[in-house]
């Protein structure tokens, strides 16, 4: 039992540290791909690290209208996101009975993180913050059924509601797509969820601060210094976690079988490479779409919903 | 090549491919429901027809029935080339780029209604299909076919422009073809006649739709250039006009 706990603690530390370290890189990589698509050189691949480091050194300024929510929200947001990260293994799958990979737990942790981010947006008492929170929560409430439906489909096919188990089963059968190619539409649905949850084009443009279009950026407009650092870092980690769900369920190769330094290193490299490919796909996808008008956004979700519900119908009945 | 494909497609892979194709055929119909740009609508229809062609080919590889191969070729030639080419040609002449009018149902509601109707179709059809003792996959193929036909109907009554309604009709016809592929085994001559009928119908309806908003004096004038439409020079000219018009619009937009 104590060995199990040690193994699990080691998993938590490694998984979290790895997620925190590589997440900013993926944000930069997507920006770089988009810049290349626009014929520019783009910022350095380490620019997000520099930005985060700069924010860490800056003073935190609070609005005189804000309450304690504004002060605690960034910490809670980061903690919830990091905890959600434990639900998705990146390097190795701990063979323990702690059931930390529960889909419900994972979704609610991310939901709670988003809730505190939205509350902090309102707490600043600025028009933009409230507007951003309202938009983000509207979008979240529409995408929620799609996410649940996707995980229901996975639970039906893989006979488990634990993400760790899902990845283990998928890994044991050599990749879920190779055994059940009909689940390919779910990959697209999950990709749409990734785009929506990380607030990227065509839902939101994380690089602009246009008052008419911004969603996520409006919500964190009142944040500064260390608080903004935490908010930005949590968004980057959330993106990595969602990418890991997609990558590790559909392409579950490269995991460390035994926990040695070399095998963990190889697993890290594998995950890093797979994620880089996904980032390039995201960058190309973003470059080929214009931002959708807010009232056309639900249709984008409906397509993901349609894809997942059709996959379930065909998997259950055919 | 054929032998290679036949040996590569295992039963599991066959079921997987058919399921993916069915899902994407229905998704393409959902895209047609929501799209407002007419040229994009047309390309979505072409995509749907290509998927149907692939589906017919995959079924041919499985069943080795040459009728399916002919059907695949027929669908490819008529629904991927002839009909879209004709509609595009007519569209080039029409002064209309988008169809933003949605009646009774918004795009999002239409997709939700489609999901509901797909489920309803399954519930209503499953007792009938059980009697036909079809495999679950083929039963779902029939359900997808009827759902596609219903989605075509939704496109027809929820959109305002005649050209979009015609694309809705074509989607509906694709649904009928899908049912034909999975449930009934119609003789090729019947399928061929259906296609000929379809082409005639589309030609007539588009020609008539072209003057639908014209006054009595204008109507003859609008229909008059039709005989010239099928000459190469006329098409080149129309295409050139269309391209320059697009460029001018973009330039004025930039300004």
Image: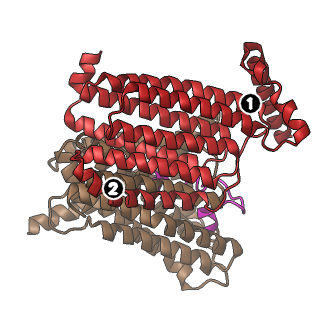
Chain colours: A brown, B red
Q: Is residue A207 magenta?
A: yes
Q: Looking at the picture, tell me which residue is in the foreground, A79 or B146.
A: B146
Location of the N terminus of chain B by quadrant is top left
Horizontal side of residue B49 vs A166, given as left or right: right
Which x, y percent locates residue B7?
Answer: 21, 23
Residue in the picture at 69% in, 44% down: B162
Please give the residue where the numbered disc 1 appears in the rendered image: B92
Q: Which residues are magenta?
A: A191-219
Which quadrant would residue A203 be assigned to in this image?
A: bottom right
Between A315 and B205, the one nearer to me in the picture:
B205
Q: CA distance from mark 2 to mark 1?
A: 42 Å
Task: Identify which residue is drawn at 60% across, 80% down.
Answer: A123
User: Within 10 angstroms of label 1, few (less than 14), some, or many (20 or more) residues?
Assistant: some
Percent position (x, y) of residue B3? 24, 17
Q: Mark 1 falls within which chain? A: B
Question: Given this view, does label 2 or label 1 mark the residue nearer the observer?
Answer: 2
Q: Is residue A193 visible?
A: yes
Q: In terms of secondary structure, where does tag 2 sit?
A: helix
Q: Dot 2 surroundings within 10 Å: few (below 14), some, or many (20 or more)?
A: some
In the rendered view, tell whether residue B235 sits above or below residue B55.
above
On the image, the x and y values in percent for residue B127 come to 27, 57
Q: Residue A269 bears which disc, if any?
A: none
Q: Secondary structure at mark 1?
A: helix
Give the total number of marks visible in the rendering: 2
Residue most toward the right?
Answer: B217
Q: Nearer the viewer, residue B228 or B253?
A: B228
**Would you say A212 lies left or right of B54 here?**
right
- Residue at the spot of label 2: B125
């Amino acid at each position: 039992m104590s060995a199990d706990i040690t193994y699990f603690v080691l998993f938590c530390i490694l998984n979290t540290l790895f997620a925190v370290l590589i997440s900013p890189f993926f944000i930069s990589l997507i920006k770089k791909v988009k810049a290349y698509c626009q014929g520019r050189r783009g910022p350095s691949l380490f620019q997000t690290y520099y930005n985060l480091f700069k924010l860490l050194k800056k003073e935190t300024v609070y609005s005189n209208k804000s309450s304690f929510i504004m002060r605690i929200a960034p910490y809670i947001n980061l903690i919830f996101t990091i905890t959600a990260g434990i639900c998705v293994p990146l390097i190795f799958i701990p063979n323990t009975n702690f059931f930390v990979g529960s889909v419900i737990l994972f979704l609610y942790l991310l939901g709670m993180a988003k809730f505190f981010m939205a509350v902090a947006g309102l707490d600043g008492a600025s028009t933009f913050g409230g507007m951003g929170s309202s938009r983000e929560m509207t979008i979240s409430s529409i995408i929620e059924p799609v996410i649940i439906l996707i995980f229901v489909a996975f639970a039906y096919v893989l006979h488990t509601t634990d993400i760790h188990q899902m990845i283990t089963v998928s890994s044991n059968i050599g990749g879920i797509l190779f055994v059940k190619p009909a689940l390919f539409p779910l990959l697209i649905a999950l990709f749409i969820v990734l785009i929506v949850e990380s607030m990227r084009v065509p839902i939101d443009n994380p690089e602009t601060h246009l008052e008419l279009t911004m969603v996520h950026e409006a919500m964190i407009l009142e944040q500064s210094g260390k608080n903004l650092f935490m908010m930005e870092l949590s968004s980057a980690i959330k993106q990595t976690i969602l990418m890991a769900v997609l990558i590790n369920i559909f392409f579950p190769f490269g995991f460390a079988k035994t926990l040695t330094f070399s095998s963990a290193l190889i697993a890290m490299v594998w995950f890093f490479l797979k994620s880089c490919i996904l980032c390039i796909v995201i960058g190309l996808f973003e470059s080929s779409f214009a931002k959708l008008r807010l009232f056309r956004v639900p249709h984008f979700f409906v397509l993901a919903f349609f894809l997942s519900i059709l996959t379930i119908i065909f998997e259950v009945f055919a | 090549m054929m032998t290679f494909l036949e040996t590569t497609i295992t039963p599991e892979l066959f079921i997987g491919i058919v399921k993916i194709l069915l899902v994407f055929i229905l998704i393409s119909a959902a895209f047609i429901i929501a799209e407002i740009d007419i040229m994009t609508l047309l390309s979505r229809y072409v995509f749907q027809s290509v998927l149907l062609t692939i589906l017919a080919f995959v079924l041919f590889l499985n069943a080795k029935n040459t009728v399916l191969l002919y059907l695949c070729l027929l669908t490819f030639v008529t629904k991927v080339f002839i009909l879209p080419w004709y509609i595009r040609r007519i569209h080039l002449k029409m002064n209309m780029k988008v169809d933003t009018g949605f009646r009774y149902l918004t795009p999002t509601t239409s997709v939700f209604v489609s999901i509901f109707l797909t489920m309803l179709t399954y519930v209503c059809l499953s007792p009938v299909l059980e009697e036909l003792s079809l495999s679950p996959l083929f039963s779902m193929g029939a359900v997808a076919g009827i759902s596609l036909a219903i989605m075509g109907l939704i496109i027809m009554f929820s959109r305002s422009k005649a050209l979009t309604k015609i694309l809705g009709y074509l989607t509906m016809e694709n649904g009928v073809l899908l049912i034909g592929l999975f449930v009934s085994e119609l003789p090729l001559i019947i399928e061929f006649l259906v296609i000929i009928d379809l082409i005639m119908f589309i030609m007539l309806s588009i020609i008539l739709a072209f003057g639908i908003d014209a006054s009595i004096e204008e109507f003859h004038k609008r229909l008059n250039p039709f005989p010239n439409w099928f000459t190469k020079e006329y098409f080149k000219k129309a295409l050139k006009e269309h391209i320059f018009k697009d460029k001018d619009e973009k330039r004025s937009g930039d300004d």
